[in-house]
Amino acid sequence: MWGAALFYLNNAKPSYTSKLSLSLPGTISYTNINLPERGTASSQAVSPYENTIQDPRENYKIIIESPVVHKAAAAKVNMTLEKFGKPRFKIIDKTTVMNLEFKGDEPQQAQAKSWAFYQAFQERLTLLRRKESAQKEGKIQTSLRDSQRKLEVAQKRFFDYRNKSGLVTDKQLEDLATNLEILRKERDGAAVKQQQSGARLRELSSNFKISTPEATQSFILQSDQVFRQHLKDYSEATSNLVLLQSKFLTRHPLIIDAQGKQDLAKSALLSRSQSLLGYPIGQQLLNKLSGDGAQQTFVEGIVTAGVDQQESKATIQELDGQIAQLQTRVETLAKHKSTLEALKREMQIAEAVYSSSLASLDVNKSNFYGSYPEVQLLTDPSLPDEPNSPQKNLVLLGTGLASILSMTAILTMYSRSSKLKLVPATISAKEQ
């Protein structure tokens, strides 16, 4: 045993161990994006250890033991996979620390293997993160395209309907409603004015005993200068005839001459009224027109009241038409507004979904360490000062213990063998 131990110590190649420690952060920060009236993409600080079912370090252990990582690390130091070997991996309980050890024939070789493995491990994590990010981004891009198409459709429906309806802003409907109320107030005022004109017309007509059509005809005729001249001539001729009739007999030449002048003036009046009204006036109206100044004043008042009544009536009819049109316009726009509000809500929802998808895409780009948290190099790979194998003291101690045990066994067997030889000799003496 001692020969074998000394031979092993003299001929065994020394082995060096390089150690490094990795640590996972306690929390991972996520971005929070808020777009007012558009959408949100929220994230928060999450610990990879919140899930009690799994430990991310165990996932990393599988990656560390992956042949892909070993091959990549071996290629970095120009070694075969068998010569590179596998690291010793240990997770320290209740910490975020993972310890790794690599053996080498020389201290520099062991340290180089540690660095190569760490780089290969990080490259593998980066590749996995990129694949995961690409998968998520692909799904978000698909959702983003769908959201964009829906948004474009919603926007087209909204703007097409708005252009078709003519309702651009809510204020437009408010202005129409205000104008409608103004027209209604104007109609109420015109109705009041019509009632007042009608009451005045009835009062004057009752006092003067002339109808509204006669008053209107009188106003038209008296507005003509030629008719007024003929009316003046007729009034003078009539007055002169009355005066002469009070003095002379009917067949007197002066009366006959005055009668001729009256007939001539009357004929001129009837002819002029025919041209102005389309028909000759009657004798009753002619007598009223040719009366005194007070009668003329009454006639003008009746005419004015009649004209005011007709104007008020025409104004009411016109306002009724405008009110009806505006009322129809308001009702139509109110229906359009209801539809537009529904289309606007759809467009806003589509905008919010699109904005959220777009924000999620940005969040996904910033959240590069989603399923694979960032690994920190807690301690750099060490450069061993002494070999860890062979351990001379341990070999000598083991050989010494083995020697003691072997000697104890030999002495025990020898002692037992001596006792067995004495027992037969004693039995033979007793038989003799």
Image (tube, rainbow, N blue to C red):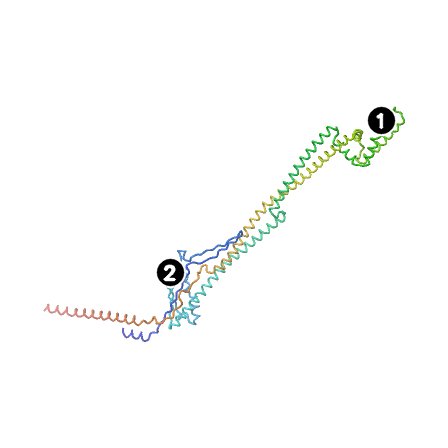
Tag 1 residue: 243
- Mark 2 neighbour class, 10 Å CA radius: few under 14, some 14 to 19, many 20 or more: few
On-image quarter of the C terminus: bottom left
Direction from residue 388 to residue 280 in the image, left or right: right
> Looking at the image, which is closer to me, 169 or 57?
169
- Residue 194 in percent (x, y) is at 69, 34
> Looking at the image, which is closer to me, 405 or 134?
134
Q: Is residue 270 in view from this perspective? A: no
- Mark 1 neighbour class, 10 Å CA radius: few under 14, some 14 to 19, many 20 or more: few
Q: Amino acid at mark 2?
A: Thr
Residue 219: name its quadrant.
top right
Q: Residue furthest right?
A: 253
Residue at disc 1, secondary structure:
helix
Residue at disc 2, secondary structure:
loop
| Disc 2 to disc 1, C-alpha distance | 141 Å
Residue at 84% from the left image edge and 26% from the top image edge: 243
User: Which of the two labelled residues, at mark 2 and mark 1, occupies the earlier sequence position?
Assistant: 2
Can you say whether 370 is above or below 250 in the image? below
Residue 391: name its quadrant.
bottom left
Q: Amino acid at mark 1?
A: Leu
Q: Is residue 276 in view from this perspective? A: yes
Direction from residue 96 to residue 364 in the image, left or right: right
Task: Point out which mark residue 95 bears.
Answer: 2
- Residue 83 in percent (x, y) is at 39, 71
- Residue 15 in percent (x, y) is at 35, 72
Residue 289: name its quadrant.
top right
